[in-house]
Image (cartoon, rainbow, N blue to C red):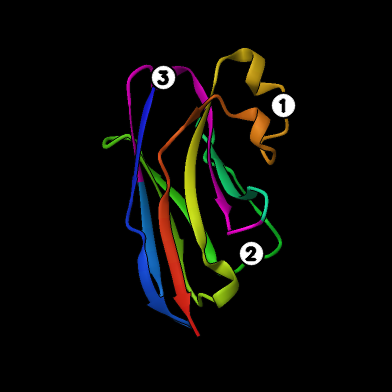
């Protein structure tokens, strides 16, 4: 599985961005596609994820009500719509795929549940 994230950039506080994550390869066995972020000097943290089977989503408390994950099966792409951005949302955002039965048993809110990662895209929110 290969992942290509895009859509990052510089935006003012209160603005919006939409990140995309295009997947290729053996994606039919994937269970979750997730988004994580890592700010300078901080650990990578969960942002949200979407189930491939039923489209259900989960979000970190810090982004609930502001961020929305969606998917386009035809394009094999997952999106992260980010609204009402805050300076604390500044980070490198990574998309990831959980593929294979072993990983499906792990809580999708933790990084260990994902075995394929994209290269990351920088999001900078200016205050």
Q: Residue at x 52, y 60 (%)?
A: 91
**Residue 4 appears at what percent x and percent y?**
33, 39
Q: Residue at x 64, y 48 (%)?
A: 46
Q: Is the C-beta separation of discs 3 and 2 under 8 Å?
A: no
Q: Which residue, given by chain and number where applicable, does mark 3 sit on?
A: 28
Q: Residue at x 48, y 45 (%)?
A: 94
User: Which quarter of the image is occupied by the N terminus?
Assistant: top left
- Determine whether the residue tagged by mark 1 lies in a helix, strand or loop: loop
Using the image as rendered, state which of residue 106 and residue 39 is in the foreground.
39
Circle 3 Cα neighbour tier, 10 Å, few/some/many (<14 / 14–19 / ≥20): few
In the image, 23: left or right of 56?
A: left
Mark nearer the N terminus (1 vs 3): 3
Q: What are the residue bounds of the magenta stretch?
A: 21-41
Q: Quadrant of residue 115?
A: top right
In the image, 88: left or right of 117?
A: right
Q: How far apart are marks 1 and 3 (CA)?
A: 18 Å
In the image, 126: left or right of 112?
A: left
Note whether 100 is above or below 7 in the view shown.
above
Circle 2 Cα neighbour tier, 10 Å, few/some/many (<14 / 14–19 / ≥20): few
Q: Which residue is drawn at 58% across and 53% down?
A: 38
- Determine whether the residue tagged by mark 2 lies in a helix, strand or loop: loop
Q: Distance between the residues labelled 3 and 2?
A: 28 Å
Note whether 86 is above or below 21 in the view shown.
below
Work out which residue is located at the far bottom of the displayed protein and give it.
127
**Residue 108 appears at what percent x and percent y?**
66, 35
Q: Distance between the residues labelled 1 and 2?
A: 22 Å
Q: Which residue, given by chain and number where applicable, does mark 2 sit on?
A: 64
> Disc 1 vs disc 3: which is toward the camera?
1
Q: Which residue, given by chain and number where applicable, does mark 1 sit on?
A: 106
């Amino acid at each position: 599985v290969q992942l290509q994230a895009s859509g990052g950039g510089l935006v003012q506080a209160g603005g919006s961005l939409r990140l995309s994550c295009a997947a290729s390869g053996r994606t039919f066995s994937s269970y979750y596609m997730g988004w994580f972020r890592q700010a300078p000097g901080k650990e990578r943290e969960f942002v949200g994820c979407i189930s491939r089977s039923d489209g259900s989503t989960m979000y970190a408390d810090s982004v609930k009500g502001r961020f929305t994950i969606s998917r386009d099966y035809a394009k094999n792409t997952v999106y992260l719509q980010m609204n009402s951005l805050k300076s604390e949302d500044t980070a490198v955002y990574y998309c990831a795929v959980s593929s294979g039965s072993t990983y499906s048993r792990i809580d999708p809110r933790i990084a260990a549940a994902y075995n394929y990662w994209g290269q990351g895209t920088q999001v900078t929110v200016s205050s």
